[in-house]
Amino acid sequence: MSPYASPNDHRRYHYLELANRLRVLLICDPETDKSAASLAVNTGHFDDPADRQGMAHFLEHMLFLGTRTYPKPGEYQQFMSRHGGSNNAWTGTEFTNFFFDIDNGFFEAGLDRFSQFFICPTFAPEWVDKERNAVDSEYRLKLQDDVRRSYQVHKETVNPDHPFSKFSVGNLDTLADLPGRDLRSDLIAFYETHYSADRMALVMLSPAPIETQLAWCDRFFGAIPDRRLGPPVLSHPLYRLDDLGIRIQLTPVKETRKLALTFPLPCVDEYYDKKPLTFLSHLIGYEGEGSLLSLLKGRGWVNQLAAGGGISGANFKDFGVSFGLTPLGLEHVDEIIAALFGYLKLIERGGVQAWRYEEKRSVLESAFRFQERGRALDTVSGLVLNLFSYGPDDLLYGDYMMREFDEPLIRRFLAKLTPHNLRVTIQAPEASTDRLARWYQTPYSVQSISEAEKIRWQQSEPDPALHLPAPNPFISTRLDARLPALPADMPSCLIDRPGFRLWHLHEHQFSVPKGSLYISVDSEHAVKSPRHIAMARLAVELLTDHLNALTYPAELAGLGYQIYAHQGGFTINLSGFADKQPLLLDMILGNRTLGYPDPARFSEIKEQLIRNWENQSKTRPISQLFNQLTSLLQPNNPPFEQLLRHLRTVELGEMPGFVSELFARVHLEALVHGDWTAAEALELAALLERHLGANSQPSAETRRPLISIQDRGTLIREQGCDHEDSALLVYYQSRTTRARDLACFTLANHIMSSTFFHELRTRQQLGYVVGAGNLPLNRHPGLIFYIQSPVAGPQILLDAVEEFIDLFPLAMLEFTEQQWQESKAGLQAQLSERDANLRSRGQRLWVSIGNKDLGFDQRERVREEVGRLSRADLVRFITQLRSRTSDRLILCSYGLGHEHDERITGQFVDDPRAFRLNAATLEG
């Protein structure tokens, strides 16, 4: 049986059920460079025993630590990494999903290893205790995470008999051995009770023929036992009557203010072919002119609005409308809620119309018709849950299907969006609280909403400024891709003159009527000083805010855009259907000088940016170390605390002159890629010059220097973090951007990363966040090792990293010749991967332009250098990373529990500004 597929999808599909009732979707993709598989189990934290909360999550961890066929912990990850692959898993409320990808030639062997998770895991006793510590580290990592903290409050304010109320992550308390019951025994009992083929679904993707894949899935997965469990049943409602009509207040860690209105509904899965809630979300969440968001932003009360989101499960669905509040908006929550109910009345009176449904349907239909091939891993892991939600025919189409306008059905759900079926949650530093949530210690309170408030909201009338969306002018009408007369595989430079370079590629491989525009605007004025950098970033935020209502219809119609600051100025990126992009670009560029917002809106955007930057000091320690690394080494990317000092003093009156100067001398570099002819690319160039070049002088590209740490030995920088965990980051920098150096850094990371993870995270249990990575900065390769730990301070973490680096060359000498060659081949396969779709190709080409790889062949040159590297070359390279001989930068933070630990000693960077001023630079 083959599900209905997009006309643009040329892969073969086959759906079947094995004899053990495992549901399977097989995908034959002859063009894929990677094979992938995903297996989902209809079991999650809802199934945790009451006295073993976190068990489903713990089981997910344990399945990676050995099977009877492949008992060695870490071997699975090392096998995948060696052959160009990756692997992961997640545990949710009702599902657990496992997935991997790998080079095509090793897919069969990968399936063999993967399938054993579900047939014969060992649950080795020596790893049970280690891995419960890993789960505890994961729990502690998120103690200051506002999403987790508010989620726990949600759990404590629902029906305690519903499994949503359970603690999902687990920690040392919930996973402790109990009198007469050790954790391993309970783990095995849970596995045997809940893991069954009839609760599983599998998706496989490979270039292998369907017939071959059929044999593989039967051979490897046919032995999964069918315990005939049937789907889990939820017998209690999520909310009791007392759980409705309440106002919850909670205090976040970060300075954020949010209002969430939740309308409990029954499960809506059976209506996937009509999508009544998608239609209502479309109307309520509209952000164009005359919208609810536009009205409330104009009053200075909110910055964002989102509609339709919320938790869902087998017997419930929350329909949420959430607002990002301003400080002033926090004082007007009652009026905001009243405005929503007034707008719902407007929808009830004139919004439930067939033409509006048809407009939304046509956008989804076009998205499905011109659906582009994604990465193999994303495809399988994204489709596997559909095998539980949709019939075989609709496995691919179900997410896009809007079969018919059913007005009574839509009105039935609209009628449930009332003040009497409502939960209000306010998240703000000013929240009034009287209790603490368990596990995360979130301060919160619960109060009943009075009947008078409910009646007042119910009687609200639409504000005169509100109106429903007009027909969308951005919906694409040209839906046939045009092939170029002379196909090319790399861009050609159509314009190359002082101040302007235009690249163009009319795509021939991905036949879709879409395109990507990338426009980099370099301006020395934008990065002249830290104050200028702060003002340039504020200008981008003001422009994005100003454009929101104007461009929202374009986003609904399948167009997208981003405007973001970089080390030379800023970039504008457009994507989606090509024929309407010139209209969108003209709108963006026509508003670039902002027309200047009213003082209240300017103040709010400025304060919002200040809050965002201030909140960076409240992120997890390892994230702060990464921020510190880039700000220390990139002069055009100052630290947030320095930018904050300048941003606080910026006044509205300064901005027009600043923006005028910003555009007075610019260098433009643009890429036009996709369904664009050369003539159309030149028309876009004329549009750019009309807006950006008419009153500007050409300029050279802005320099993007990188601070050199060469010949400096070990440099150390401490970062203060208000967190229980300590963190460490060790960075090594390449002297050059040559292909051989790129090859050395990339191959070293490829070979070391999975072993580093297994050794320091799984075996030594130093923390949950552990990794090694390839981190290029301003075109220069870099190698990093990082750990965030609740159990050890930076000196112990550094000792572990140094010991690993010291011993790894010896481990490499023990590689067999086959292992060495397979490791190199795995990386070479990654470097040879074909672009999955139009967007990924455009991104790669744009990165090549930014990296001055104007022959667009850097990957091939690095691939060739990897092939030339001998084992002795790499041993020599890794040996040079040892502490006695290397130039490196160490960033660390001491957790609250490790403040009195032994300090790392060495050459400290106490004054980052002086360090940057006195250091040599490498040109990016």
Image (spheres, rainbow, N blue to C red):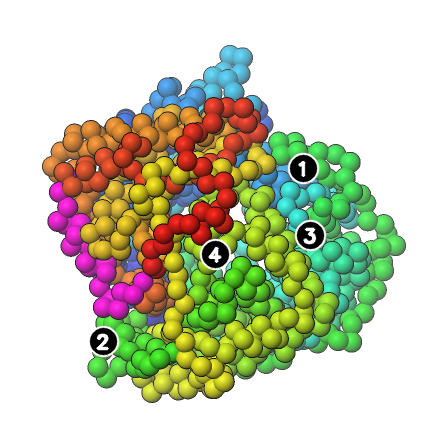
The disc placed on residue 176 is: none
Q: Tell whether 35 sits left or right of 351.
A: left
CA distance for labels 2 and 3: 51 Å
- Circle 2 SS class: loop
Residue 68 is drawn in which quadrant? top left
Magenta region: 851-871
The disc placed on residue 488 is: 2
Position in image of residue 904 (x %, y %) = 44, 29
CA distance for labels 4 and 2: 37 Å
In this rendering, the answer to whether 670 lies above or below 188 is: below
- Residue at 43% across, 21% down: 129
Residue with the mark numbered 1: 442
- Circle 3 SS class: loop
Residue with the mark numbered 3: 257
Q: Crowdedness of circle 1 by 10 Å Cα count: few (<14), some, many (20+)?
A: many
CA distance for labels 1 and 3: 15 Å
Disc 4 residue type?
Answer: Asn
Is residue 112 in view from this perspective? no
Residue 760 is drawn in which quadrant? top left
Residue with the mark numbered 4: 637
The tag earlier along the polypeptide, 1 or 4, is 1
Is residue 746 in view from this perspective? yes
Q: Crowdedness of circle 3 by 10 Å Cα count: few (<14), some, many (20+)?
A: many
Nearer to the camera, 544 or 230: 544
- Residue at 57% across, 61% down: 531
